[in-house]
Image (cartoon, rainbow, N blue to C red):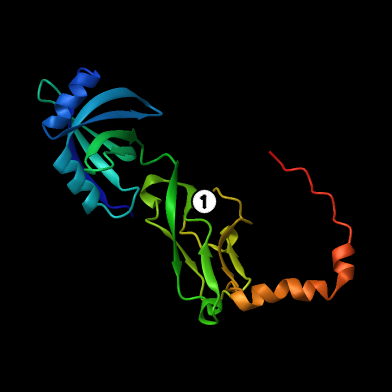
Amino acid sequence: MQQQVELTAQIRRTSRKREARRLRRQGLVPAILYGPHTAPVSLTLNRHALRQALSTAAGENALINLQIEGDGGQVETRTVLVKELQVQPVARTYLHADLYEIRMTEQITVEVPIHLVGRAEGVKLGGILEQILRTAEVRCLPGNIPQHLEVDISALKIGGSVHVGDIVLPEGVEILEDLKASVATVVAPTVEVKPAEAAAAPAEAAAEPELVRKERAKPEEEEE
């Protein structure tokens, strides 16, 4: 079951850029709430409270119980996900948040991280592990969103691959990726050519003139 965290928001009456900059100077984060059954609502979040809620939550798709405080003191509770979070690249402060309202009885589509588990047999023999797919799109009820998907690579040999179809899914979770797509593979180590070997290559080619005279194939047209 997904962990839920608490967060408070205030309704924002204006969405002008000048107002957004003023809010950020006060330690607040402009936000927008929307969803399939929700008309967009402009909100303001406390930056520290938002950071604390996200650090407390386990996983990227944590459910947030959002308490929206109105002008008259009334409070509405909405269940939301952080759909997008804009961050200042240098100071790493939050600039804007997109909150997506959900219903616990309706399935949603989210991106879930893929974690590789174990040490591949091919790596023990000198192979190089390459993770090709790092997230997967899944569909499920909000309460069933997995924190991550685990893929056991222990039996993976050099030249072998593990595919999306090999992932063991939690109950109630449907994966939307191509089942034949590779998640991870172990490739053979690259052999570096030593300078002496590289210098000897032209001499070897000269000893076999039939290779020099061999007609070259016409280069294929490059795909755009």
Say above or below: 134 vs 193: above
In front of the other: 172 or 213? 213
Q: How many marks?
A: 1
At mark 1, the secondary structure is strand
Say above or below: 152 vs 165: below
Q: Can you give x and y, in whole percent of width and height, for residue 224 in the image?
A: 68, 38
Q: Residue at x 39, y 40 (%)?
A: 105
Q: Quadrant of residue 82?
A: top left
Q: Quadrant of residue 72?
A: top left
In front of the other: 16 or 58? 16
Q: Residue at x 13, y 31 (%)?
A: 25
Q: Can you give x and y, in whole percent of width and height, for residue 67 in the image?
A: 19, 35
Q: Residue at x 73, y 43 (%)?
A: 222
Q: Can you give x and y, in whole percent of width and height, for residue 49 in the image?
A: 15, 42
Tell me if 110 is positioned left or right of 156 in this view: left
Tell me if 196 is positioned left or right of 96 in this view: right
Q: Residue at x 55, y 82 (%)?
A: 125
Q: Can you give x and y, in whole percent of width and height, for residue 153 in the image?
A: 51, 71
Quadrant in which the N terminus appears: bottom left
Say above or below: 131 vs 81: below
Amino acid carrying mark 1 in the image? Glu
Tell me if 6 is positioned left or right of 60 in this view: left
Q: Which residue is labeled 1 in the image?
A: 174
Q: Is residue 69 visible?
A: no
Tell me if 127 is positioned left or right of 180 in this view: left
Q: Is residue 198 visible?
A: yes
